[in-house]
Every structure is written in C-alpha cells, then in structure tokens.
Amino acid sequence: QVQLVESGGGLVQAGGSLRLSCAASGSAFSRNTMGWYRQAPGKPREMVATITSGGSTDSADAVKGRFTISRDNAKNTVYLQMNSLKPEDTAVYYCAQLTVFIYWGQGTQVTVSS
C-alpha cells in the first residue's frame, strides 16, 4: 500500500513562494511517475505538474515558468517549487503516484492573498 504525505502548504501573499513536499512509502517510488494536482472550491481537480521516473516533466500552462516539479529518489520525495504565486493558485494541492492505480495524498492547503 502506497502512502503519500504532503507538507509545506500555507498562507502567502501574492508574488511569494512556497515549496511543497510529498514523502512516499514503498519501494516503487523511483519507478513511477509522480504528480501534483490541485482543486479549488467548486472546481474539478486539475493537473499541475508531473515528473516521470526518468525525470521528464510536464506542467499546466497556467503554472509554466512559475512552478517547478522535482524528485529525489533517494528520499522517496517529490517537490513542487511555486514562485510568483497568484490568488488564483489558491487550492488544495494533492500529491499523486501514477501507476495502474492512482494513489493520492491527503492534500495540503495553499492560500494566496492579494
């Protein structure tokens, strides 16, 4: 069973930065694609960024140039560096491990004030 634990969320002013971390249990971390998703109130969950086992990344147009996903396989951890935050980035951010199944973390709240 995979367990994902996010941390690093909080309240920040527009233009500020936050770094989210997601620690994963299990030995399969390095072999799987990891992702960050977010869900704002009243909106569907959306992909923010993904990173493959080989380190290839993809990100949503809304965050390109501002957010960076990375991983440390030795620590079973994936990160999301978020810069130049905007109020519209306010959401619950979820870590996910993408296999035949999708495993989700519990989410961490990010609130950006204007």
Image (tube, grey):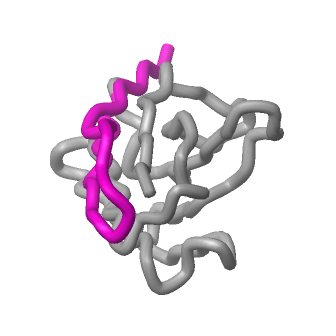
Q: Which residues are magenta?
A: 1-24
The image shows residue 74, relative to residue 3, as above or below, that is below
Residue 53 percent location from the top left of the image = 46, 62
Q: Observer-nearest residue: 100 or 97? A: 97
Residue 33 percent location from the top left of the image = 55, 54
The image shows residue 59, relative to residue 113, as above or below, that is below
The image shows residue 5, relative to residue 45, as above or below, that is above
Residue drawn at x 50%, y 77% is: 56
Residue drawn at x 49%, y 20% is: 106
Whether residue 42 appears in magenta in the rendering, the answer is no
The total number of labels drawn is 0
Residue drawn at x 66%, y 71% is: 60
Q: Observer-nearest residue: 85 or 100? A: 85
Q: Residue furthest top?
A: 1
Residue 70 percent location from the top left of the image = 34, 65
Mostly what secondary structure, the magenta segment?
Answer: strand
Q: Observer-nearest residue: 103 or 26? A: 103
Q: Quadrant of the C terminus?
A: bottom left
Give the image quarter of residue 28. top left
